[in-house]
Amino acid sequence: MKKNTLVTIGLLGAAYLLFVSFKKKTTLSGTVYVGQTNAPTSTDQVYSKVGTKVYDKNNNLIYTYDTANLGMTVTGTSGSKLNVIIGSDFAAGEVGFVDSADVQTI
């Protein structure tokens, strides 16, 4: 009887391992944030929301983001405004200001 019990436990264990191996695998997913290239390592990045508005030094609207999660490098602050460099490349980017409530940080 001991031998039959061990065989049964072994078969149940093998069946469980087989079941687990065919179980649907889950994949990790999440938000992709695109950082700005060539940004100095000591600077912070903030990320756009849909509708984030960027202004020049005279408070004229220069850009409105229609895509979320695109990186901007913060170069300073002025009250609730962040001085940022926008564009995909820090060196070739454009200087602007955004309201700190209009961007996201991670």
Image (cartoon, rainbow, N blue to C red):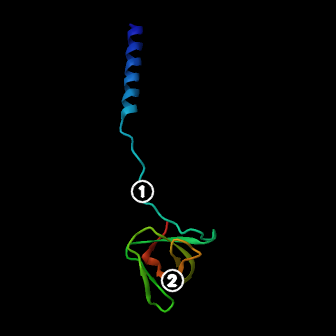
Residue that carries the numbered disc 1 in the rendered image: 30
Q: At label 2, which amino acid type do we have?
A: Gly
Q: Position of residue 20 (x, y in %)?
A: 39, 32
Residue at numbered disc 2: 96
The quarter of the picture where the N terminus appears is top left
Residue displayed at 59% across by 70% down: 39
The kind of secondary structure element at disc 2 is strand
How many C-alpha atoms fall within 10 Å of the one at disc 1: few (<14), some, or many (≥20)? few
Residue depicted at x 37% and y 33%:
22
Q: Is residue 40 above or below residue 5?
A: below
| Type of amino acid at the residue the image marks with label 1 | Gly
Q: Is residue 75 left or right of residue 17?
A: right
For image coordinates 37% across by 76% down, the residue present is 51
- Residue 78 shown left or right of residue 40 in the figure: left
Frontmost of labels 2 and 1 is 2
Q: Position of residue 88 (x, y in %)?
A: 51, 71
Determine the CA span between mark 2 and mark 1: 29 Å
- The residue closer to the viewer here, 101 or 74, is 74
What percent of the width, then of the height, locates residue 78? 54, 85
Q: Which residue is rendered at x = 39% and y = 44% of the image?
A: 26
Q: Secondary structure at mark 1?
A: loop
Q: Position of residue 27 (x, y in %)?
A: 41, 47
Q: Of all residues shown, which one is farthest toward the top?
A: 1
